[in-house]
Amino acid sequence: MRATVPAALAAAGAAAWSLPALAPLAPSLCRSLGIPRTLPPDAGGPPAVALTFDDGPHPRGTPAVLDALAAAGAHATFFLVGEQVRRAPALAREIVDAGHAVALHGGTHRVQLRLTPRALAADLDRGHAQIAEAAGVAPHCYRPPLGIFSPAGLALVRRRGWAPLLWSRWGHDWRLHRTPGQIAAELTERLAPGDVLLLHDADDYSRPGSWQRTVKALPQVLDEIARRGLRTTALADPVG
């Protein structure tokens, strides 16, 4: 019996450590951890949804997404990776100049559970500084790679005054053989005010060329948003 106690304690510790990582799959867990998946209630004006793009900036994907958004007069938030900003710093500023918001997706695209708290803190701070310098705006919102938080990561983000944010709708646009129609249909199914929509404007961490299908899906997505009487909003203010 005694031998099982350390094992039980280890299992409990492992479960506690990995619990926040399940948040993208469990809305109730998001609520208990205080991680928003949707926008706060709108105080006025037309109901809104938030279009968000992860993993950029990308030298071809990001400009193509910006063109599609401009054609529809839509606004979005780009969760940028510091190492990608370092490769294309002018794109970070271009996003802001086009009226969109920038947010933090990490210094590198590494899962939080694989980093020590010290390494994660350094990664977060480096990415934040790279984005702020290139974009001229310091990001206030954060989404981890793959949406996976560790307890240490969640604490580090909140300690810095950043708002964590996941998503309520996605199109799985990084998957192989995903068509633009499938992306748009899944993303907008049961679309409702306050939804946060997840797409990707880069393919550095996913299937090569996946951003091209995302760009082709965007007009369908934006048309459906408008058809439902919704507007797109950039995350200019903290969420939660």
Image: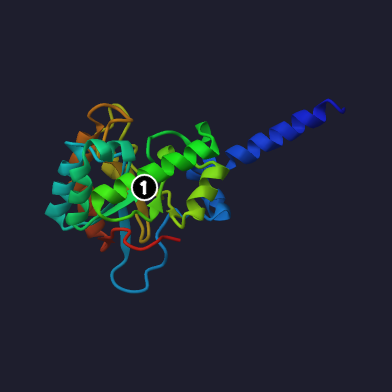
In the picture, the quarter occupied by the N terminus is top right
Judged left or right of residue 20, residue 188 is left
Q: How many residues crowd around disc 1 within 10 Å: few (fewer than 14), some, or many (20 or more)?
A: many
Residue at x 27% of width, y 62% of height: 230
Judged left or right of residue 240, residue 16 is right
Q: How many labels does the image show?
A: 1
Residue 84 found in image quarter: top left
- Residue 21: in sight, yes or no? yes
In the picture, the quarter occupied by the C terminus is bottom left
Figure check: 15 above or below 158: above
Q: Position of residue 187 (x, y in %)?
A: 32, 46
In the structure shown, which secondary structural element does the residue marked by tag 1 occupy? Answer: helix
> Which residue is the site of mark 1?
128
- The kind of residue on which mark 1 rests is His
Residue 212 found in image quarter: top left
Q: Position of residue 126 (x, y in %)?
A: 38, 42
- Most extreme residue toward the bottom is 44
Residue at x 41% of width, y 49% of height: 142
Residue at x 36% of width, y 58% of height: 192
Q: Position of residue 193 (x, y in %)?
A: 35, 61
- Residue 52: in sight, yes or no? no
**Colour mode of the rendering:** rainbow
Figure check: 36 above or below 57: below
Q: Where is residue 177 in the image (x, y as percent from the top left)?
A: 28, 27
Is 53 or 29 nearer to us in this picture? 53
Residue at x 36% of width, y 53% of height: 196
